[in-house]
Amino acid sequence: MIIAIDGPAASGKGTLGKRLAAHYHFRHLDTGVIYRAVAKALLDARIDLGDEAAAVAAAMELDPEKFGDPVLKTQAVGDAASVVSAYPKVREALVTFQRQFAAEPPGAVLDGRDIGTVICPDADVKIFVVAAPEVRARRRTLEAKARGEVADEALVLADILRRDDRDKNRAVAPLKPAPDAHLLDNSHLDIEGGVRAAIAIVEAVRAGRQRV
Ligand code: C5P
């Protein structure tokens, strides 16, 4: 079984996907980390983010062993990720890795922006997670502070709005729900509530299938 979690609020530290995967004993891939790793490679080498060829080269040389690097979670890397992720060839270079991950048994949860629309259009369950930008800004600020970073909530909100706009309006794989995605608004849910709501969606889809 493949579960696709997309949406502007899909990752939030990858918690929802990770928890859902643990619940079903599936494997989990936070695909935002892949784009963040590409961005970090450019930032580390002081290469301009506008250098598409360098971004493609970085995408082809990714080392999944480094996906746990905490620096990947910073705002600066996230912002740079949304720039490099708009390059069609960067996205193309990362498709096979993601599909192979999804196909391996016993099942997988992938979270990102285009899992249900592009990477796994045949996913068994698709969940599109949204939350009010102000709520996401508060959460991201608290996460950043917990990591010891300085974070100004108003600036974090501006960054979120800019990034969402870039993700939604890019030409390739823009952020949008698949027609068969189930909407999950977690603005008023804590992590536990979000996980419960996601499990309820998966179970409803499974039950619906069994009846057919
Ligand atoms: O989810 P996260 O904040 O880690 O993603 C960082 C950026 O990577 C997003 O703003 C988006 O531009 C890009 N991304 C993407 N497709 C994905 C996952 C992330 O374009 N599947």
Image (cartoon, grey):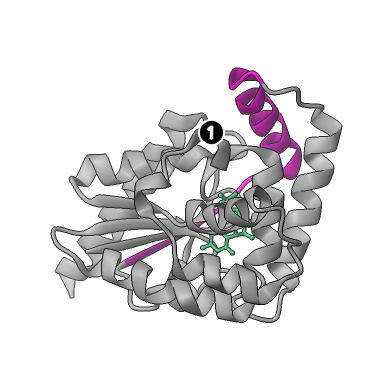
Instruction: Identify residue type, mark 1.
Output: Leu
Residue 118, compared with residue 159, is above or below; it is below
The N terminus sits in image quarter: bottom left
Q: Is 119 included in the stretch rendered in magenta?
A: no
Ligand 1 shows up in which quadrant of the image? bottom right
Q: For residue 206, say whether it is visible.
A: yes
Residue 18, compared with residue 201, is above or below; it is above
Q: Is residue 195 left or right of residue 203?
A: right
Q: For residue 174, say whether it is visible.
A: no
Residue 72, compared with residue 204, is above or below; it is above
Q: Which residues are magenta?
A: 125-148
For label 1, the SS is loop
Which x, y percent locates residue 82? 67, 59
Residue carrying label 1: 189
Which x, y percent locates residue 28? 31, 50
Return the residue nearer the eye: 43 or 125. Answer: 43
Which x, y percent locates residue 90? 56, 74
In the image, what residue occupies the spot 84% across and 44% down?
A: 158
Residue 15 falls in image quadrant: top left
Q: Is residue 140 left or right of residue 69?
A: right
Q: Is residue 74 left or right of residue 5?
A: right
In the image, what residue occupies the spot 26% across and 58% down?
A: 108
Residue 162 falls in image quadrant: bottom right
Is disc 1's CB within 8 Å of ligand 1? no
